[in-house]
Structures are given as structure tokens and as C-alpha cells.
Amino acid sequence: MNSILLLEDNPDRITAFQQAISMLGPDYELKFWHDAPTMVAECERWFPEAALISLDHDLNPMPGASGDPGTGLDVAMFLAECCPVCPVLVHSSNVERAWSMHNELRFAKWAVERVGPIGDDWIGKSWLSKARELLGAQANTWPARIPADHAARLERAQLSLDGLSVGDGFGQCFFVDAEVASERIQQSEAPPSPWFYTDDTAMAVSIVRTLKRYGHIEPDALAGAFAREYARDPRRGYGGTAHGILQAIGQGTAWQTAAGRVFDGAGSCGNGGAMRAAPIGAYFVDDIPKVISEARASAAVTHAHPDGQTGAIAIALATAWFAQRRSESLRPGMEVIEFVLEHLPHTETYYRLKKALSLPLQLSPATAACVLGNGSQVIASDTVPFCLWCAARHPNDYVQALWATVSAFGDRDTTCAIVGGIVAVGVGRAGLPDDWLASREPLPRL
Ligand SMILES: [Mg+2]
């Protein structure tokens, strides 16, 4: 079945659209919404079968409805955040806003045209004629590949995101006076709420959103999502290089160019690819080649250097390892690191991670960090080995894992985000303390 998705508040027009669409034959059916917020919340599920989208702009509240009906521009802006699905017709008489909708969609590479609601039976005449033309010209291009068990995968990815974001906010609270931080760590005294999340979480939200929408990492969509989140709130602790890359992507530079030209063309080997990668392992769990390729793709959007990508692959692999064993009672041990090494590309992070195998888990995290790094250089090879050692040391205790991680200081929001995102899928939702979850600033809607 081919669906035509319609935003229209006028009942007479909806009847006329129904009649016009019946002229297209039995393969077409109409889905309509009276208001923008409901269409934004629901229309995505029809994307796989959408043949045409037609949008009004000005909307009146329906009788008895509470809440703002929004406008067609709200829907156009939402669509512009997604990969193009099918042609769009804007059928509003509000010319100025119709062109705004047109521009939003055009800039996001959607095929879009306008039909003015002019004359008698314009829906049966000019709209239907234009609809036929567009339907013949462009088929559905929605790039989603949603696996049958998508819901269960997504639930694990969200659990990892919760672990990651709580860790991020927790760790960030320790960027305070060193004595205060040490005292809190010695007493295991959780910092006062709220725990604001940082760039680690903002970017991981975009990753989980992309997985939710497409069932895989769609690099152009992910790059756009990173840039939009950055523009919405650039002061979340992004690294210096990230500012330049994300601004450039937001201004229309291809991510390949923006990410490829930094550090004299070497690309970034920073820990930014690793800090957001855990939900990918949680989503792809049992498909190791996919864990590797999707983690690499997620990092490549901002990290062109091979080791920046290796960092992301290592974290996604470790998370997948934990997710496969979540029901078992995990014991401290090096198996997870051995598993990661077995599949990891041989770049800097690989060799540094090998050293972790020789560091007994009885050592203090601060001692291990002397050998492995603690993220203070904000590069993957200085961050990922220590994080995996901490996860191996506390595989069945989320809280102890984070106390151990933060005790080495360094890039503590990121090290805690990474360890939190991994260990959470091993311990399950019950392993995340309610009061810690409540302390974390609420996350944006996925
Ligand atoms: Mg951060």
C-alpha cells in the first residue's frame, strides 16, 4: 500500500482529498492529521510506505481539542531533520509561510512543490494533477532498514544511553576544587543534583535517535543531527576541534570535508568517537561485523583519523560483549578486553589496550591510569584502555564502576560516560540507582 500523508484541519478539504486520492486507484490510501504536534509524533511510522506528503500551513484548533495545533512549518522543520522520504506538496494559501516550508525542505534535499488553493475544486484539479506528476517522478527513498527485533534492540540502546548520560553528568560534577572532589570520592558521597550532561550525552542522543529512525547509522543524517544539537546548545563542553567541525557541517560543509581537513588533513584521533559509541554495541549485540562497521561509521562523521574510529569500535565491542551476558552474573576479569582486542584494528588504541591485560584488577584505578592514561590528553588511545580496564574491574556494579573511574580524574565526564554506557547494559535497568537517574538532567526526546 502507498500512503499519502496529509496535514489539514478543514473537514471539507479532507473529504475532497479523500475523493481525489481515490482517483489514483486502490493502491493509495490517505493518512491525515489535524495538527502539527500529532503529525510530528506519528508520521514517521508511515515513512516506509509514504508516496507523497501534502502540507497545509495555518491550522485551527479542532473543536474540543486542547493545545496549540502548531503550523505546517513545524512539520516541514521536522521532515527537514529526516532523510528525504518522498515528494512533498505544500498546499497553503499563506504564501510567505509556504515558501518558508518550501525552503526548509529544499535545503534538506527533499523534492518539494507548491499548489495554491485557488478556484473551485482545486484539490480535484490542480492538486491531483501535480500529485500524479510527482508520484510518477519519484518513488519512496526512505533509507531505513529496521530489523524485526528493533524494539528490543532500541530498549538496550536506551539503557546504555541512560548509563552513559548519568555517568557523564556524574563525572562532570567532579570538575571542582581538587580537595572537594577527593573528599567526595573517599566518602563515596554522590554530588548534589542536578547533574548536567555534556557533549558526550548530546552526541549519544543523536546516535540513539538515528538508530531509532533508521535501524542503522545513516552518516548524513547523523552528521546533521550532531550539527543541530550543537547549534541548539554549543556550550556543552565540546572540544576545540569539534566546535569547528560541527559549525562547518551546520553551515552546509560535507562532513567528509569538515572532519577530513582538521589536524593538517590527518583527522581527529580524539575520544569523541568513543564517548558516544556504547549504544551502538547495545543495539547490534550479536552481529559483531555490524558492531564494528556501524561504530566506525558513527565516529567517521567527526573523526577521520583511524584511531579516533578504533576508539569507538572498542567501546561498542565491549558494550556488545556485556549485552550478550547481561543475564549472567559477571565477575571481574580480563575476558572483555581480550574479546575487544581480538576484533580491534591495530592502531594506537589497540597497543595501549594490550598493556591493560598486564595490569591486575586489584590495582588502584589511579595506578592503572599512570600506565593507561586517564583521558587528560582527550585522545582515544589515552582514554579507551583505562575505561575498559575499569569496566573489567566492576562489571556487575554500576555505582562502583563509576566511583573507580572518576577516582583517576582526567577527562572524567567522558571516562564516566564511557564506563557508564558499557556497564549499564550488563547490570540492566535495575542496576542503575533511581536517585542517580533522577539527579541527571532530563534527556531530550528521542
Ligand atoms: Mg563532555
Image (cartoon, rainbow, N blue to C red):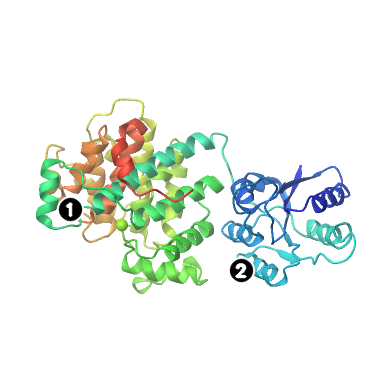
**Front position in the image: 93 or 348:** 93
Task: Of the two numbered discs 1 and 2 on the same chain, state the one appearing first in sequence.
Answer: 2
Question: Which residue is labeled 1 in the image?
Answer: 409
In this view, the residue farthest toward the top is 328
- Please provide percent x and percent y for residue 239: 32, 65
Q: Residue 118 carries which label?
A: none
**On screen, 62 above or below 328?**
below
Residue name at image x 31 percent, y 61 percent: 270
Residue name at image x 24 percent, y 48 percent: 385
Whether residue 206 can be seen here: yes
Circle 1 Cα neighbour tier, 10 Å, few/some/many (<14 / 14–19 / ≥20): many
Residue name at image x 27 percent, y 40 percent: 337
Question: Which residue is labeled 2 in the image?
Answer: 107
Left or right of 396 on screen, residue 137 = right
| Quadrant including the N terminus | top right
- Judged from the image, the secondary structure of the residue bearing numbered disc 1 is loop
**Front position in the image: 302 or 197:** 197
Question: Are the residues tagged 1 and 2 within 8 Å (C-beta)?
Answer: no
- Please provide percent x and percent y for residue 44: 62, 48
Kind of residue indicated by mark 2:
Phe
Between the C-alphas of marks 1 and 2, the distance is 43 Å
